[in-house]
Amino acid sequence: MKGLLRSLRTRKVLVVAALALVIALVLVTALTHQGRVAVKTALLLPQLFPNAPVHPQEWFAPQPLREEVSYSVDGGQRVADLYRPRSGGKHGAVLLFMGIVAEGRDDPRVVGLSNGLARAGVVVMVVPGSETTIACRIDPEEPESLVAAFQYLRSQEFVDPRRVGMGGFCVGASVTMVAAADPRISDEVAFINSFGGYYDGRDLVKSIASQTRFYGKRQEPWKSDPFSREVLINQLIDSLARLEERVLLRRVFVEGQQAAPGEIEALSPQGRAAYHFLDGPTLAEADALIARLPLAFQESLRAVSPSEVIEHLQARVLLMHDREDTWVPSEESRRLADALEGRGDIYYTEFSFFQHVDPTHRVSLPTFVREVTKLFLHMYNILLLVA
């Protein structure tokens, strides 16, 4: 009988302890910023998976408001989409630049992410690329547009100007980082999240041209996505001064035709360098050729390279990259993390279940659980700054 009473008392203590723990967790969640952000992050996560069976965030938060807005850039007007929570008051905000996205502002991934962030209490402004960017070219004027867009977003009456960050994907991530380092806004950008961006445009095009990824002294074969090569071809050919050389190289590298005997030898020094750069050089050959490419091409790469402005960047930096990315080698984000290491305020996550920026790569269940945990922690660190 004594043993039974002792067992009952033990169970009672365990039940009371468990209830106390649950109550404590509820109070921590309800009463602390960190707890509320953890809940928001958990609800947001399914929104990032296109094939998720349920989206519980939609059970608790109403559909955000979406409106088209316009802002001034160099005397002209650019349009963007603004997503904002239906609740009143001031909210943290993030400016998103998608870079080269075929469907632009209506891309389902863009809409899903923006709606999810807005349901979590964040104002989101989605800036589409210029006509040049949409046409598979990297527009060196994009940072100027993003500076103006950031200033517009930060001035809205429903935005808390102390909690405004920037984010971008692929090429858009790097261009956004260049904008965030601009002296006009550098001390106002609370954070920047770069997903799949590059550190130096020259290193990126060398990787694409040579089909090689490199980091330090290590080099490995790398097969780039055809779209990355298409952007490189367009950017380089368009930078040639002579029309006849642009026509020839487009015929060879876009239409897949053979050059006639003597045509390559007749090219200007810059035209020949461009031809050999696109004709499958080794990494060492690409490295030697890049200095002989058209100056316009080299300048356009510098204008959108974070490596050129990294010392002016003041925002907290969060980096994400698919380890096997075929658009931009993950080594680019590693070099960026190395360049920022001395600051001590970066958060870097590499993933293995993304395909470029889409979480659609098939992995084992243990790997999936590990990767989702990493994604939760990364998104938690973002929302901690803005939500």
Image (spheres, rainbow, N blue to C red):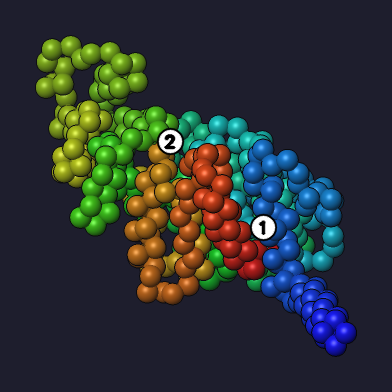
Check the image and report above or below for 93 versus 171: below
Could you say whether the residue bearing mark 2 is in a helix, strand or loop? Answer: loop
Is 377 or 118 nearer to us in this picture? 377
* Distance of label 1 from label 2 (alpha carbons): 26 Å
Q: Is residue 308 left or right of residue 265?
A: right
Check the image and report above or below for 365 versus 349: above
Quarter of the image for residue 228 reads: top left
Residue 195 appears in the figure: no
Identity, as a three-letter code, of the amino acid under mark 1:
Leu
Among numbered discs 1 and 2, the one appearing first in the sequence: 2
How far across and down, in percent of the image, does residue 207 sit?
A: 29, 42
How far across and down, in percent of the image, does residue 11 sit?
A: 82, 78
At horizontal 29% and vertical 45% (from top left) the residue drawn is 213
Identity, as a three-letter code, of the amino acid under mark 2:
Arg
At horizontal 15% and vertical 32% (from top left) the residue drawn is 269
How far across and down, in percent of the image, does residue 311 sit?
A: 38, 68
Dot 2: few (<14), some (14–19), or many (≥20) neighbours within 10 Å? many
Tag 1 and tag 2, C-beta contact below 8 Å = no
Dot 1: few (<14), some (14–19), or many (≥20) neighbours within 10 Å? many
Residue 203 appears in the figure: yes
Quarter of the image for residue 163 reads: bottom right
Screen quadrant of the C terminus: bottom right
Is 264 or 184 nearer to us in this picture? 264
Screen quadrant of the N terminus: bottom right
Could you say whether the residue bearing mark 1 is in a helix, strand or loop? Answer: helix
Residue receiving disc 2: 137
At horizontal 56% and vertical 39% (from top left) the residue drawn is 360
On residue 179, the disc is none
Residue receiving disc 1: 153
Q: Is residue 211 left or right of residue 168?
A: left
